Amino acid sequence: MSNVHAPAHAHATNALPIDEQLVLVTGGGRGLGAAIVKAFFHEGADLVINYRFSADAAEELAEAVRARGGNALAVEADVTDFRSVVAMFDAARAEFGRPVSTVVNNALVDFSFNGDERERADEIAFESLAQQFRGTVGGAMHVIQAAMSGFREIGSGRVINIGTNLFQHPVVPYHDYTAAKAALLSLTRTFAKDLGPLGVRVNMVSGGLLRTTDASSATPESVFDAIAASTPLGRVTTPEEFASAITFFASPASRAVTGQNLVVDNGLVMD
């Protein structure tokens, strides 16, 4: 019997296996984003690799996925520009003939991880925070809102936001970055509440320093060693380990999970 007239919440248990999904990763051309793309490729998903400036890296990654039997499309879009984001989703539908089912909000707009050079609390301007809010919160909002027509068509959807363990362990004065990610956690929970009746699950995965990405490549080995010594497992998390945790939130195994923040840092922070 058709369920075309069923209320929206009747679709809440819909959960596509990852190998039947089309997954969009923002900032997916390099660093952690590339590791996330590869993790979903290994799970059998089709992929949309968003980039802003890293065209060559994104195209090379898409080509590598296709060379190994997968399906991937690299698409340029500035997540702070809603029209650009909508155009990206239109390009994905045109290429794959179906809507995006999972989005990973990984893009980090105009930020440098240089702890020794960051502005301190008594000198940072609000504009620095506003810039990060535009990229982190505004970018995620644009992606989620552009995905909603497809989520409604499918009857479900997955949103996975990337956070930080600096909420709980603010060892570096990244005031603007951390404040924006904290706001993204709040958005994760309010959107989870609002979109749940449509079968859309919204979660966050948070980490700390990763060994090694573009962002952490200049980190002294002594810092990695100190972090490893502070974790119960005696290790620094790799991008691949972090990305593996992200795929859980796109899988049917997480169908009863929404509004949560999973910290993946080998136990450095226990929330």
Image (tube, rainbow, N blue to C red):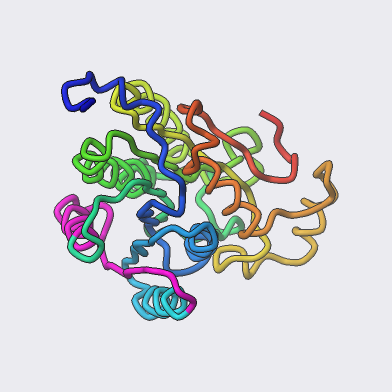
User: Residue 21: percent from the left, percent from the top?
Assistant: 38, 51
Magenta region includes residue 69: yes
Q: Position of residue 268 (x, y in %)?
A: 74, 41
Determine which quarter of the picture holds residue 147.
top left
Q: Nearer the viewer, residue 24 or 3?
A: 3
Q: Is residue 234 above or below residue 121?
A: below
**As drawn, is 98 to the left or to the right of 255?**
left
Q: Residue at x 56, y 60 (%)?
A: 114
- Is 116 contained in the magenta span? no
Question: What residue appears at the point 41 percent right and 76 percent down from the top-left corner?
Answer: 66
Residue occupying the point 46% across, 37% down? 179
Residue 128 is at least partly visible in this image: yes
Residue nearer the viewer, 7 or 150: 7
- Horizontal and vertical percent for residue 146? 21, 45
Residue numbers of the magenta segment: 68-93
As rendered, which of 252 and 257 lies closer to the eye?
Answer: 252
* Residue shown at 24% from the left, 54% from the top: 98
Query: Above or below — where is 81 with respect to 220?
Result: above
